Image (cartoon, rainbow, N blue to C red):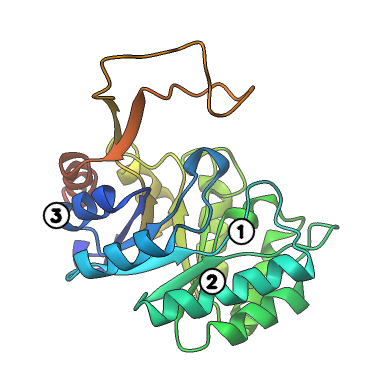
């Protein structure tokens, strides 16, 4: 087992408030996202700028995803993504997070090459589009060829804990040429097991807790999401305590 000093911890932050908790809790990096229930979309310009001002000790990566749903993008959507990459670069982000698939579930090479060119000089993470591709082992080699820095993956399963078999296989295949970052469902309760069974040293987690809305008047008959069932009088926010607990759970681990 590797020594604790080589572990890297990234927090999926859904707000500037969550960014603050991630930094105070000891995270090395945040992935700033909006619309977490949709799997994360590109945050607003204001959120990116505010996060950059706040994060003095923690690196800022920003998801580049113009909508929820699949990862097969039109030319118009790709132009939006290139513009967003240019903006977050100007705003001082350290890295970007994106992923593009073809209709057949393979890597969309044309789209990826276009975005990689726009992101030149920035750290690039290929996100969990990887988990719905048709051939993850082949795609890993294609991402290495394109200079992608890391892959965020749950090992093709609903959670990283369930995906330890593929995660371990990817880690071995990578041979240090690209980082494999385990994410989705990573908590203080399972991070040690995932590290032990995979050899992975980068972890992505949200460390969120539900907080009740300060609203006293509530009209629960109306939903802003139409038919989507979301409790609009509570918010899930990253907490400093949970970030620390998750990190310490791994640092305290001994084989």
Single out the mark in the foreground, 2 or 3.
Answer: 2
Pointer 3: what residue? Answer: 24
The answer to which image quadrant residue 104 occupies is bottom right
Q: Is residue 255 visible?
A: no
Identify which residue is drawn at 50% across, 24% down: 230
Residue placed most toward the observer, 52 or 13? 52
Q: Position of residue 139 (x, y in %)?
A: 69, 68
Single out the mark in the foreground, 3 or 1.
Answer: 1
Pointer 2: what residue? Answer: 84
Q: Position of residue 171 (x, y in %)?
A: 50, 64
Q: How many marks?
A: 3
> Helix, strand, or loop for circle 1?
loop
Identify which residue is drawn at 53% across, 21% down: 223
Asked whether, in this view, residue 118 is left or right of residue 75, the answer is left
- Cα separation between marks 2 and 3: 27 Å
Residue placed most toward the observer, 94 or 152? 94
- Cα separation between marks 1 and 2: 9 Å
Pointer 1: what residue? Answer: 66
Residue placed most toward the observer, 89 or 178? 89
- Cα separation between marks 3 and 1: 29 Å
Tell me, yes or no, whether the two marked residues, 1 and 2, touch with CB atoms within 8 Å.
yes
The answer to which image quadrant residue 138 occupies is bottom right
Q: Is residue 204 above or below residue 231?
A: below
Tell me, yes or no, whether the two marked residues, 2 and 3, touch with CB atoms within 8 Å.
no
> Helix, strand, or loop for circle 2?
helix
N-terminal label among 3 and 1: 3
Identify which residue is drawn at 55% across, 60% down: 127
């Amino acid at each position: 087992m590797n020594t604790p000093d080589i572990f890297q911890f990234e927090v999926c932050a859904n707000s500037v408030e969550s960014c603050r908790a991630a930094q105070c809790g000891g995270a090395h990096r945040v992935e700033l996202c909006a619309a977490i229930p949709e799997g994360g979309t590109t945050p607003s310009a204001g959120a990116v700028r505010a996060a950059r001002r706040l994060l003095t000790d923690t690196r800022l990566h920003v998801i580049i995803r113009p909508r929820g749903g699949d990862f097969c993008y039109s030319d118009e959507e790709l132009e939006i993504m290139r513009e967003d990459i240019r903006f977050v670069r100007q705003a001082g982000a350290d890295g970007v997070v994106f992923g593009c698939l073809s209709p057949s579930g393979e890597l969309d090479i044309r789209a990826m090459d276009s975005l990689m060119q726009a992101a030149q000089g920035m750290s690039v993470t290929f996100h969990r589009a990887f988990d719905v591709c048709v051939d993850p082992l082949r795609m890993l080699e294609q991402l290495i060829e394109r200079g992608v820095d890391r892959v965020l993956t749950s090992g093709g399963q609903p959670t990283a804990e369930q995906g330890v078999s593929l995660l371990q296989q990817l880690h071995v295949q990578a041979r240090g040429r690209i980082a494999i970052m385990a994410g989705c469902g990573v908590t203080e309760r399972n991070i040690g097991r995932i590290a032990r069974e995979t050899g992975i040293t980068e972890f992505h987690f949200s460390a969120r807790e539900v907080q009740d809305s300060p609203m006293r008047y509530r009209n629960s008959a109306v939903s802003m999401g139409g038919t989507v069932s979301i409790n609009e009088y509570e918010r899930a926010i990253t907490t400093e305590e949970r970030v620390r607990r998750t990190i310490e759970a791994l640092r305290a681990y001994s084989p």
